[in-house]
Image: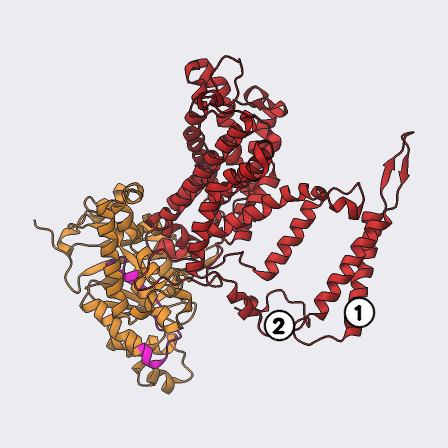
Chain colours: A orange, B red
Amino acid sequence: MRLVPPRKGDPLLVVEHMTMRFGGLVAVSNLSFTAQAGLITALIGPNGAGKTTVFNCITGFYKPTTGRMALQTLAPQHNRDIDALTRSGRRWSAGATTPGTGGTFLLERMPDYEIAAKARVARTFQNIRLFSGMTVLENLIVAQHNKLMDASGWTVKGLLGSRVYKAAEAEAIDRARLWLQRIGLEDRADDAAGELPYGAQRRLEIARAMCTEPRLLCLDEPAAGLNPRESAELNTLLKHIRDEDGVSILLIEHDMSVVMGISDHIVVLEYGKKISDGTPEHVRNDPKVIAAYLGVEDEEEVAAAVRGDAR
Amino acid sequence: MAGKSSGGEAPGAASAPVSVLDALKGALFAALIALGLCIPMVLLRTEQDISNRLVLEPKWGLVAAIVGIVFAARLAWLMKPARQSSTKARAALTLSPGAARGLQVGGLALLALYPIFALLVVGPSGAIKWVDNFGVKILIFVMLGWGLNIVVGLAGLLDLGYVAFYAVGAYAYAIIATKVIPATAPALGPYAFWICLPIAGLLAAFWGIILGFPVLRLRGDYLAIVTLAFGEIIRLVLINWIDFSNGYAGIQTPRITFFGVPFTSLSGDERTFSDIFGLTGTPTVYRAIFLYYVILCLALLTAAVTIRLRRMPIGRAWEALREDEIACRSLGINTTNTKLTAFAIGAGFGGFAGAFFSARQGFIDPKSFEFIESATILAIVVLGGMGSLLGVAIAAIAMIGGIEILRELDWLKRIFGPDFDPALYRMLIFGLAMVLMMIWKPRGLISTREPTIFLKERRAVSGALVKEGHG
């Protein structure tokens, strides 16, 4: 059987029965959802609902107490052996890390850097985590560390001035330049990342994550602190990433104009439990979401906010 | 951001001009405090007289001198015209890339010609002091500073036990050269230093990894304490494992040879360096000059490797690790390997320096590897500006050269009395110098960071944006 990648709408990340406990506190309780390939999935919920905890579990910064998180990089017909893989104790199926093929990764078994490097799940942070003392360009080059490290023969060949490494570095610069053009920061490439205005830092963090060439891009509140114009630009950027780069996106967001404007699929959390899951249309009209997520006192205002016409 | 501009100005000192009367009052107050402190600390000094009795000998002259200096300094400080903009003054002191380049080339030429100058100016017998005590000793610390700079300055891992790797290198040379080589291949004896140098570096790097593993998860203060303990453990093992290291009695190590040719003949029948090249005069001068060039080459090797490594993915990963470890992991960087390589490479250079130190001294004991050495090396890195090779070199010259200069200041005895030994005050002077440095330039002498790669133009990154690392 010829191996084919998942098509748009096929499951990419399948989270099943994820529970995360911190001592006596249950931050996420028996959460199951699917993020589809080629689509934008939004994770929303009131403050403290456990959204960032879910993100930290998916990207390996936390290890969930229970649950399975399978990242399937092949079309569903290839993924029948997932239970066998789970029983085997391995972290990924044979061939999953080979370029050109694919397989299944069990993210709950992998450390954070391996999830980024092997499963190719990239993320950004709620409080921006740029390398502020390094230049904008350096930030994007560091993101391509693993590729460059291989090309430099674990530094040895690079120190000796190998041509392979030089070519790889030139390629890395080209990719960085491309992303700088896309986020409109080419002129500031040689400035320190910490000097950029807030909105530009947000865009740079997304570009840095994209420079790792991810399959799944996880964005933790990318629109936080952006003005309406920047939010609109962000919408365009994320749609481009989905449509032109073919990268699936999982995002946490409070800004309803972003969520309703670009999401293909929304999962709503409250107190660590899933209360709704579906298309924006479905979630918008779900009485549970209206009641629980946004409170019941001000129903008129709530409905308006959910419709997204408050802005 | 707020902390940057407020710096260390005393409140009110810079803003409003102070009247003469207020300044005099302030200075008098400072002088009184100095007097109060000096009476118990400086004035009362007991001496043993001929019949072994302790007699009190008041040092009024010294106290008066100190109080006078405090008074004058405080008065000058209070009277000085208010600065318009402290940030502007600070920015002007930052080196432009061109000036830094010029300083580098000029510095290198000066370093290469230094022993020859010394020979010409003070003659062969005087040159030993200037080449060995100043040149070689400073360069050892330049090299140690550059080695530690990889760990602290680039990777942002606070290492308080760096001297442990220096000790590993020194003892590796001492033990291999005095025990292993005579027992296995005595013919290699004259080449001992050159054989042991790489082994010492590798052994120190190995111990760097051994230290690295337990501290991988530690950050900040915890990391500092464990590395401090590691340095002490190595020293205590060297003191107490007498079969291995000969304890406090130390080990006599073979002197460095000119690629196998000795400088001084032990048995008297070997051809020495002076015989071969037909040189007259004390052979120790030639040895000192040779040692100088060896350590110069080793130090420059450290600098070259550091400069190249910074432009490699591993070097960028070190700096990224210093900036933000969590972001590194989110980008797929294996922070374990990154930290271990920083520890190993930094330690390796410490090991080279240790082997060289051992060959230069001709004798080592655990007293050479106490915590004060680690603290000095760290102070050099911090004063120089973490990550800046030039800054570290300047700081090493100032700190180590400063100690040696203090020994030369005999004329001070004419002012403070014949018992005054300026070298005894070096820690006090250093403390003061460091406090002043941290007020004047809190991020070190050269605080700007040179980017490792650029698209259009190389622009130095302001030190205010560069992080110190957190572990």
Q: Note whether residue A231 is visible.
A: yes
Q: Please state which of residues A109 and B328 is positioned toward the viewer in this rendering.
A: B328
Q: Secondary structure at mark 2?
A: loop
Q: Amino acid at mark 2?
A: Arg
Residue A158 lies in what quarter of the image? top left
Which residue corresponds to mark 1? Answer: B24
Q: Identify which residue is drawn at 40% across, 81% down.
A: A296
Estimate how packed mark 1 is, as few (under 14), some (14 to 19) or many (20 or more) residues with alpha carbons within 10 Å.
some
Is residue A208 depicted above or below B118 in this figure?
below
Q: Is residue A154 left or right of residue A240?
A: right
Measured as percent of width and height from the top left, residue B7 is found at 59, 65
Point out the stretch of residues depicted in magenta: A209-231
Measured as percent of width and height from the top left, residue B87 is found at 54, 69
Q: What's the distance in space between the residues labelled 2 and 1, CA to CA? A: 20 Å
Of the two numbered discs 2 and 1 on the same chain, state the one appearing first in sequence.
1
Q: Please state which of residues B429 and A95 is positioned toward the viewer in this rendering.
A: B429
Q: Secondary structure at mark 1?
A: helix
Q: Identify which residue is drawn at 42% across, 83% down.
A: A297
Which residue corresponds to mark 2? Answer: B83
